[in-house]
Image (tube, coloured by chain):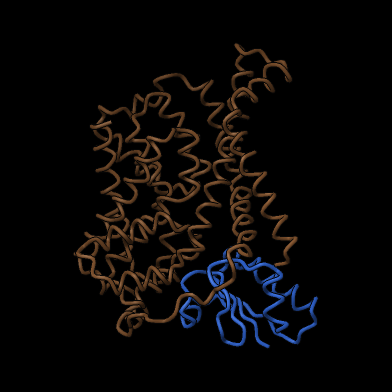
Chain colours: A brown, B blue
Amino acid sequence: MKNNKKIKLITSILFVLPALILLYYYLKPLVDYVTYTFLSLSEESHIGASVNFFIYDTIKILILLFLISSLMGLVNAYFPIDRLRVYLTTKKMYGLQYFFASFFGAITPFCSCSSIPLFIGLVKGGIPLGVTFAFLITSPLVNEVAIAMFLGLFGIKATLIYAISGVLVGTIGGFVLGKLKLDRYLTDWVKEIQADSEQETEQWEKDNTPFIDRLPTIINEGWSIVRKVLLYVIIGISIGAAMHGYVPEDFFTEYLSADKWYAIPLAVLLAVPMYANAAGIVPVIQVFVAKGVPLGTAIAFMMSVVGLSLPEATLLKKVMKWKLIGVFFGTITIFIIFLGYLFNLIL
Amino acid sequence: MEIKILGAGCAKCKTLEKLANTVVKETGVNASVTSVEDIVEIMSYNVMMTPALVIDDKVVFKGRLPTKDEITNLITK
């Protein structure tokens, strides 16, 4: 990249980043001004409150989403998946490898269409099936979109709980699945690959484009994630804003409150066929919680929506026999339900 | 020159294919651009993250979308 281009890039980052952070901190008074003074909507009126809520939440989430996706892009640029594979096969981990695989699944963003090559790649590198599963479970569960939405709508405490429990589900789920000796339920061509697996010693630093040259791509990708989910964010927040005003209090609590034993399994079952992405679903869940549904149930619901989906199951069909897909999904479901109960007890 | 785009139909893979085609047209390099969607063939390149760009059977990019400049540099080299 040419020098003047570099300088331009760095100056624009130096301007945009503080500007975004400032905007984030002063967003509330700003949006108040726009809705109540500029649009002269009454603060007490229903429409005023809804418009205010809508503008505030949308902008806040988009800022968070952009910052977090760019950050994840940075992490990803410096933590190539090949390095993880070598790391997991060459180091003695004493059981911690499940945790590491799960943790890296959380911090590496990848598009769901990559899950099959990723799965095969890990199996090919001689990584045990359970560890591969740990990675595969957490990866969609804890992603940049879910984190940004949670941070924007529930605050930092709930976000941490969500992220940590996602990593835990992956760790324990991977461990349990590893113990079940499920390798025979892989499809035949995957079994062949597994038999030929070899420890990778190949060089991983092939992509030696300098950092500054990669930065535009990383920022572009962060921006493209924002653009991709923009519509869902708007739809989700609109539904949320509408529900806030019109759905009566206690409407959901009748079915989903903590003292109903079937609440969590019901929430999870309802969630599995939904393939709404996190951006669309979190604003709706936020209303559930505001209307009295306990956070544990909400988190369980959320995890099932993003972590268990039918499209993913059909993708996995290429590498797993139905029985394995069933066991895989069943195990995750059980852990999510268990976590839901646990959170409702302790939170 | 033989350019291959590895990726099972994701959005970024399609963008990369378009980008590669544009670059080939603009630079006038004699190259064919094909897209590989078969997972078994993709895995034969030892690629874990899609999209990936393969030039003359060598993986030059994987797991991210290269910029137009990067592709131009690679195929005019």
Q: Position of residue A138 (x, y in %)?
A: 37, 55
* Rendered residue at 54%/74% (across/down): A207
* Quadrant in which residue A301 is drawn: top left
In the image, residue A85 sits, relative to residue A45, either above or below, namely: below
Q: Residue at 63% of width from left, 21% of height from top?
A: A32
Vertical relation: A346 (above or below) A11: above
In this rendering, position of residue A180 left or right of residue B18: left
Q: Quadrant of the C terminus of chain A?
A: top left
- Of residues A209 and A307, the one nearer the viewer is A209
Residue A267 in picture, x, y percent from top left: 35, 39
| Residue A27 seen anywhere in this rendered image of the structure | yes
| Residue drawn at point x = 63 percent, y = 18 percent | A48
**Residue B25 located left or right of residue B71:** right
Task: Quadrant for residue A258, please give it.
Answer: top left
Q: Is residue B25 above or below residue A135?
A: below
A210 on left or right of A149: right
Name the residue at 56% across, 38% down: A61
Q: A134 or A330: nearer the eye?
A: A134
> Up-down: is A225 above or below A322?
above
Residue A117 pos. (x, y %): 45, 71
**Residue A323, can we see it?**
no
User: Total of numbered circles in the picture?
Assistant: 0
Horizontal and vertical percent position of residue A271? 40, 44
Q: Quadrant of the N terminus of chain A?
A: bottom right
Q: Quadrant of residue A170?
A: bottom left
Given residues A259 and A155, the one toward you in this image is A155
